[in-house]
Amino acid sequence: WPDLLAKVIKIDVRGDIDTIHPTNFCHSCWNAVQRKFSSSPCEEYFPRNDTLEWDASKPSCEVCGTSFRGIKRKKQALYPQMSKKFRIPAGYATKIRRVRNTKRVNNKALMKKIANCNKIHLSTKILALDYPMDFVKSISCQVCEHILADPVETTCRHLFCRVCILKCLKVMGSYCPACRYPCFPTDLVSPVKSFLSILNSLAVRCPVKGCHEEVLLGKYCHHLSIHKEVEDKEGYVYVNKGGRPRQHLLSLTRRAQKHRLRELKLQVKAFAEKEEGGDVKSVCLTLFLLALRARNEHRQADELEAMMQGKGAGLHPAVCLAIRVNTFLSCSQYHKMYRTVKAITGRQIFQPLHALRTAEKSLLPGYHPFEWKPPLKNVSSNTEVGIIDGLSGIQRLVDDYPV
């Protein structure tokens, strides 16, 4: 754009009217500037009502022809200018021409290498129908030649994948890779909706091995995600190679459950030691809590969360022991009540008998260790101490004390 703006919009008072308002330029210049300056100031330099002389679109255009050469500084000639021109042999000229063609081919390969999108973009070979070559070219990227993914349009009406064109603009410079017209990332726009609907309605074959299904390009990502989910599930499915049918985990004995979950237990233990300071119980309870939330069992999850925070809905074992003693329930009667309440409510409000026995042991004398310490200094060792009113050593009758 700098050369184009300098030639077209430069106002020089010393120049004539043709310098300010050029009358000879190609149709590409007209279209580009009409799109770039769609407001009224555009008419100041490109009058819409006047008759204009169009030139053929060719590299020798005086206005936009400089964009093909770029705006870089000219390199010095390899050979100094001499008064006499040497004749170049025909074979040498052919070699030079071949080198230039090779450079152009290498430029295309370089752009593909810059894009590096073979693993993320789809090849045109997976199209289900045999579309015409021109149509395939119109729906493919000008850089990577894959089917357009998140297509964008430049000011010169060329289509590219968004990732490819941004990489090329960053590495190779601010010009269109197809026609080398000046182009910037801010000029990229989305194509019209009709083109996007045509692109999304293309039929493609699924490239996954063993799947010969034809899907629309717009639904290809969803179809591929289904394959990925199936692969993830197959990675954990146990393959039964004959013999007895595999029993459910809950129907096994405790020893068999330990054997089946051994690998998972080792993984959880390693994670707990690395991340949570070896607290395996908290990790397992959190996993169980997340599983309940995922299945929308929020009531049970709330109870588990309250229990983890020490605010469980169940009664303390000492409270349950007090209830059993005060209501004169035997152990068997209390156990029946405990089972009935748990079966009806689905919650463990009362604690089991073994918890009550543990609480009873902690309340009985002799459970907590106790050591008799020697008397302190300056304290009498006399044990004849009255227990009423704290009187010590006063011999009185019981009748003398006030009632």
Image: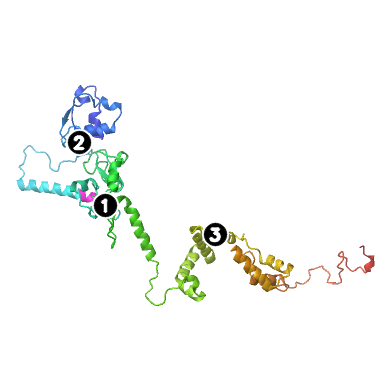
Mark 1 to mark 3 CA distance (whole Å) = 46 Å
The main secondary structure of the magenta stretch is helix
| Mark number, residue 203 | 1
User: Which residue of the protein is positioned furthest toward the bottom in this rendering?
Assistant: 243
Which one is closest to the eye, mark 1 or mark 3? 1
Mark 2 to mark 1 CA distance (whole Å) = 42 Å
| Mark number, residue 57 | none
Looking at numbered disc 3 in the image, what kind of residue is underneath it? Ala
The percent coordinates of residue 5 (x first, y second) are 25, 31
Q: Residues within 10 Å of mark 3 (few under 14, many from 20)?
A: some
Seen in the picture, residue 252 relative to 168 is either above or below; the reply is below
Reading the chain from its start, which is encountered first: label 2 or label 1? 2
Residue occupied by mark 2: 66
Residue occupied by mark 3: 301
Badge 2 marks a residue whose secondary structure is: helix
Start-end of magenta stretch: 108-116
